[in-house]
Amino acid sequence: MNFQERLKTQTLLMDGAFGTYCSRKQGRRGVSYELLNLTDPGLVEGIHREYLAAGADAVKTNTFGATPDALGRRLEEVLTAACGNAARAAQGTGALIFADLGPVSGDPAQRFNAYREIIDVFLKCGLTHFLFETLESAAGVRQAAGYIKNRCPDAAIIVSFAVDPEGFTRAGISGRELLLELQDDPQIDALGFNCVSGPYHLLRQVKALPPLKKPLYICPNESYPTMEEGLARFGDNPGYFAHLLLEIADAGACIIGGCCGTTPAHIREARRLLQERGARPAVPEAKASVKPSALPPISSPLWDKLERRKLVIAAELDPPAVSDIRKFLKHAENLTQAGADTITVSDCPVARVRADSSMMAAKLKRELGIDPLPHMTCRDRNLNATRALLLGLSIEEVHNVLVVTGDPVPSADRDQVKGVWSYSSAGLADYVRALGQEGTAAPFHIWGALNVNAVNFTAELEKAFRKRDSGVAAFLTQPVFTRESIENLRRAREALKGAYLLGGLLPVLSHRAAVYMNSEVAGIRIPKEVVAQYETADKDRCRQLAVEHTLRLAREIRPLVDGYYLITPAARPSVGADIVGLLRKEFQ
């Protein structure tokens, strides 16, 4: 009986973990479990037999980490041995053998190429069941599934993502959205979640899913590990695990099993409970779609003004490096009184520590009634820390956020400070959007950055398209100074249809500042002829030049933008307020 036929009448019980169980049995550490297929095939075959004896309907090949990057020229040898070990263990049992493919790295094309190299060996060995597991995104998976079906139309393919207790992958992508995205792909036979989360949290995830068009695969971790002497130690409560696994099956999962920390004892207990429950259709009746919890409607004067096609002026302030914020609040108040619609608060610019941008935004909202736009970088925070800030912003009714990659940590600090880069700006935008869609936080208006000074602006536009597809609906550009940057802004206006653009303006207040920005600040190019005008100018003349050049550029780009993004000079914020007033007067 094949995979599809079994699911019509039974819940399919997969095996449990290989690596953590092997480590527990042998006390092994620092070894490649995949190489054990060659160096200790008896051990590998024996673990497969233990799971089958415990009642598993299927086993996975010991190939989770067998990738071209990890094994190089030994890849085919290891994969072939793994298939042989699983086949000998399953001989005469009627159990299914799944070719186990773990995550691979690279862009979608590179991932597909890596998968194809692995798939070719599995197909050569005669395997027809495939499990792509512990994934953080769908990159390369659709192509890989299509490749398998093209070569083996009767193949069965499961795709499973690793989600945290809140339902997000390591890349910040909603697991729920990934399942909904892939459920219409005819090449994929089942979808689901495994790893990272224990059974209680994956049960919650299953109950929150809308009806799916494909069978659901769920294989939780045994529990959450503690670290002892460099090893992850899981709990040992097969009864608790098995009872929750049965609840997961009753909630809609057709294929269940165990991931990290599980053992044959866990699978044996799950089999006992399934037998006591008795036979029932594996595919449950369609359940009502779960609606997100109702949150108060969001109110954003900034966004409302954009949608009414009124000119928007955003003025940027760097947060203070000290706890005294009186000057910061005063400058923000002056800028808004002059006509700024929002204060954008940078997030530790050039990776130097300053007051948190989200907390400063909440302060502006609460004390001055400003509709702020905090920057949020992909540097310095993992997803948990980012989620905490987003929840705080939602509570404070701050509904706009600018997602940016963030400047790298200065090289002089890298021996003490390590940058955290868990996701890209597009990935962060996806994460922010998903929080709103699932009702966890009030929806945010998501803003992004666009570098109109990029040497390869075609590549910059491609990044902007990815951001837009991830939920970014408005862009702040780098400062406009040159003919090239204006032409790039024109290209962006034509290409990013439906997205709002705020053209960047940066007043230059001295010859020294101009030379510094050209030499030290990435993404800014001030024409030589402009720099030359400042060379012999006194302070008053420099201020006049700053206003004149800024207004000239504002006039030139006005047909291309929905508003302006004024980067306020840190040393003389009063100049920023003067320019805001002049912009408002001229373009009201």
Image (tube, rainbow, N blue to C red):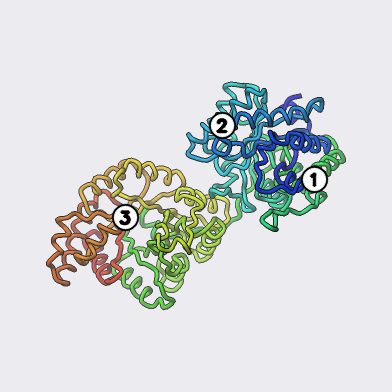
Foreground residue among 61 and 324: 61
What residue is disc 2 on? 73
The amino acid type, in three-letter code, at marker 2 is: Arg
Q: Which numbered dot is residue 266?
A: 1
Of mark 3 and mark 2, the one earlier in the sequence is 2
Are the residues at dot 1 and dot 3 in contact (C-beta closer than 8 Å)? no
289 vs 115: above or below: below
What residue is disc 3 on? 522
Q: CA distance from mark 3 to mark 2?
A: 41 Å
Q: CA distance from mark 1 to mark 3?
A: 55 Å
Foreground residue among 74 and 310: 74
Task: Please identify, in this view, whether the residue under mark 1 or under mark 2 is nearer the observer.
Answer: 2
Residue at the front extreme, as displayed: 39
Q: CA distance from mark 1 to mark 2?
A: 36 Å
186 vs 105: above or below: above
> Residue 227, how many percent across, how many down?
68, 57
Q: Is residue 407 left or right of residue 114?
A: left
Q: Is residue 304 left or right of residue 284?
A: left
The amino acid type, in three-letter code, at marker 3 is: Ala
Characterize the local packing of mark 1: few (<14), some (14-19) or many (20 or more) Cα atoms within 10 angstroms.
many
Are the residues at dot 3 and dot 2 in contact (C-beta closer than 8 Å)? no
507 vs 461: above or below: below
Q: Quadrant of residue 408?
A: bottom left
